[in-house]
Amino acid sequence: MVKAVAALGEVPPYTAPVDGPSYHMTPDEFRRVGAELVDWVARYWEGVEDLPVLSQVEPGWVRDQLPPHPPQTGEAWPEILADLDRVVVPGLTHWQSPNFFAYFPANVSGPSVLGELVSAGLGVQGMSWATSPAATELETHVLDWMLDLLGLPDRFRSGGRGGGVIQDSASSATLCALLAARERAGGAQRLADLRAYASVEAHSSVEKAARIAGLRPDQFRLVGVDGSRAMDPGALAAAMDDDAAGGGVPFFVVATAGTTSTTAFDPVAALAEPCRRHGAWLHVDAAMAGSAAVCPEFRFVNTGADVADSWCLNPHKWLFTNFDCDCFWVADRGPLVAALSILPEYLRNQATESGSVVDYRDWQIPLGRRFRALKLWFVIRHYGAEGLAHHVRRHVALAGEFADWVDRHSRFELAAPTRLNLVCFRHVDGDPASRRVLDAANASGRIHLTHTRVDDRLVLRLSVGQTWTERRHVEAACDLFDALA
Amino acid sequence: MVKAVAALGEVPPYTAPVDGPSYHMTPDEFRRVGAELVDWVARYWEGVEDLPVLSQVEPGWVRDQLPPHPPQTGEAWPEILADLDRVVVPGLTHWQSPNFFAYFPANVSGPSVLGELVSAGLGVQGMSWATSPAATELETHVLDWMLDLLGLPDRFRSGGRGGGVIQDSASSATLCALLAARERAGGAQRLADLRAYASVEAHSSVEKAARIAGLRPDQFRLVGVDGSRAMDPGALAAAMDDDAAGGGVPFFVVATAGTTSTTAFDPVAALAEPCRRHGAWLHVDAAMAGSAAVCPEFRFVNTGADVADSWCLNPHKWLFTNFDCDCFWVADRGPLVAALSILPEYLRNQATESGSVVDYRDWQIPLGRRFRALKLWFVIRHYGAEGLAHHVRRHVALAGEFADWVDRHSRFELAAPTRLNLVCFRHVDGDPASRRVLDAANASGRIHLTHTRVDDRLVLRLSVGQTWTERRHVEAACDLFDALA
């Protein structure tokens, strides 16, 4: 060290003893503390249904429980574990409570959590094929399996021009699709002329992706919807034609298969026609609803996949795989890789130069990536197609039962059709009454649900999809709403 | 369900039994399989040093071991576990082998892996404060702790205008910094005029971020370096002045504190002067080297942090925290949040509207996010400041010993100063000899190292930083190189 560092001048000569105490956790300690934490997680799952679903803490409470500065010396594990119960759990909104009906599901399962454990323990980087071939090949393989499981078309299969990759979220999938589309349309050189489209009901991540990619607000158009809140194909065609007539280049359309607000389905096949005419990339965001296709009877959610340029859905929402895990497929991987590939010297390797392998760093925003497919592989193998279908089917059936209850109730009414696992409803007395029910339900701690606006009226959303939600939890929700009606 | 769905028309009436078998893993099964997998990971760590470091499989081998289609019914855990050893392990390049000296470290530790387990098990979303206050507040708190641990300035502390957030990678931190800078400089409206800068030695992720954000190649300038491969401040100032004179708007500079190729340090303080003059945002990428600041004697790596607009480093590289975990701080969170904030109705909540909380979805590219801080909290508490410093110090000392060995060796020579844990060296007989040594070392399976180019000559990089690397592993590397010399 001494000689080598001396050349730098600013670094003091340094001669630390190389030997000395080790602060690492030994494998045996890992076994012992690991078993305790596995048990802690199992106990959390066993008890979570009795905890207030929405965290009851005030802003700042969690930080007030923590020492202002980090410890100089290491702490013992009993202290750390105790703080999980003392500080962390009260500060959680329990997404894994069977009484969680808010936003969308983000359901976990034992197999998935254990896959995450193994992925973390292996600690490999999957940025290139060469940095761990199994991380890449298992991902390609499992993404092909997912096409089988969901009944999605072969055009997305890795054997042809297409292929799949796991992104952290549908937000990133949308951004990658937009960047591929931008590349195909001429790249940054033509950026100022490009125009992107989604419906007014599309997820906020579409606008965010457009903004990140450098589109001005006037380059991203929100297209109107019909009475079912699905994008109006005529309105899309008119907007694209109008823009093209004005010198703009329509290059990217996001269709939503199951909107966040109400599970509305854009008519993907009809939207493909103006896309084809203008050479625009058609991306489908099936983040939540796409998982329903594990049940053959719900494959209407795949409508239009055979004409889409890209498709994504989140097993981390409704397929028992913990966040993050978004499956993203493209029919032609060329523009995606062209948009995102940069190969510096320090990443060059023979496998890459041979052209015979996939390097997933070129399919995503960051360079680094985990062994992403392991947990999804565990989930698919543990449940099998039949187990996954069974539980998704059950969620849909429970949502249907709740919708029927709402429909029969004198003080509540449905605010949108119940297509899968989301029920949109409101109080017949209007927004103030709906707001009162919403706030009281959440304050009770017994359930958690969120809201949206439909036709400018406040609407409660009851989303069924947590792993352990059973009929009795939905019935308890009915009882609560009945009392609050 | 029946009535609600009937309105849609296209969905067949469906009446599944809500009861029936459960395919879920029970908490007790989770305890049993979990204990097995904890033990499997411990055994992997105990045995990994004897495995070939670089995976020896050919492209396609891993996929050939797997069934072409997913299972219809679930499989038993003994089969799944057996495939970890049969298919996965041979397909890994072992980043957690103490004989791994390639690229950069991506070191894991027991505490971190257990933090990941708990984070996965809790399965909360941290996108908004309200969706789990503890996920947000612990992250803010631990990022403040990190400033203490590293001796970084108070301007990044959350109590003022600044603050920290965990990104997935330095790539994403750079992109977020660039987007904040673009926002401050006028946003997409002025995009065509903006100019960004980094040195020719900067990481490829800077160019990728510029491209993602919509900059044309001519809007991103690579600035020359001096003999130590540090960015030349005069060249930066000249490039910015030149662009400004031509009507361009210099808006963003990335300085690197420890380059990937050779651990060169850009003179951050000197680069700040032209940035100030042009109103450009100065981001510092300290991805690998920044962690060295846990040792007070290595705080030269922080030089210039007091004038930087943002700073990032990766505990997932060299601080015993498994990927992904990049710490990213800004001195002024205003432009970052302005660049990335979109608030649709379905995410509105009282805490957000009160303005009294942080919503980390507005500090990152995606919407969703895990309970990111938990594993870093576990690591800091397990090791304490003293344990972290001890092991980083030990890595630097081992790299120094290896550099001394190279310097004394008649057939090898140092190719760059050894500033921390990376030794750049080459064979005295030139590139073909260096290439032969590199390929033979990797083919041996006994170690793995990678290369770069310095002054257009092939250079071997030996990066010391894996958690369990001891003197004997470095000595074994010396023996191997000696035999190959």
Image (spheres, coloured by chain):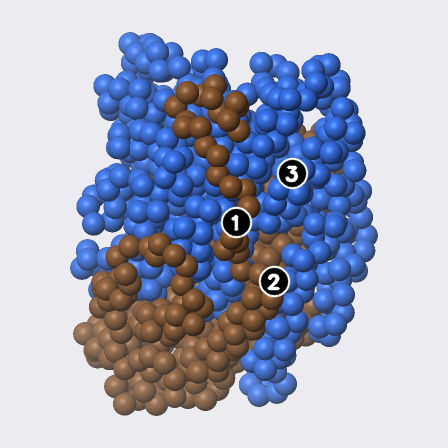
Chain colours: A brown, B blue
Q: Callout 2: 10 Å neighbours few (<14), some, many (20+)?
A: many
Neighbours of disc 1 within 10 Å: few (<14), some (14-19), many (20+): few
In the picture, measured across the screen, residue A169 lies left or right of residue A138, that is left
Image quadrant of residue B76? bottom right
Name the chain letter of the residue that bears numbered label 1.
Answer: A
* Count of all numbered marks drawn on residues in the image: 3
**x and y, in percent, of residue B373 in the image:** 40, 56
Give the vertical position of B467 relative to B307 (above or below): below
The residue where tag 3 is placed is: B474
User: In this rendering, do the residues under marks 2 and 1 share a single chain?
Assistant: yes
User: Can you identify the residue that label 2 sits on?
Assistant: A27
Question: What is the distance, in whole Å, between disc 2 and disc 1 at their CAs?
Answer: 19 Å
Distance between the alpha carbons at the discs numbered 3 and 2: 22 Å
Visible residue check, residue B477: yes
Do the residues indicated by labels 3 and 2 lie within the same chain of the protein?
no
Q: In this view, does A353 lie above or below A129?
A: above
Q: Which amino acid does label 2 sit on?
A: Pro
| Image x and y of residue A303, in percent | 58, 58
Q: What element carries label 2?
A: helix
Amino acid type, label 3? Val
Q: How far apart are marks 3 and 1 (CA)?
A: 17 Å
Chain ID at mark 3:
B
- Residue on which disc 1 sits: A20
Q: Which chain carries label 2?
A: A
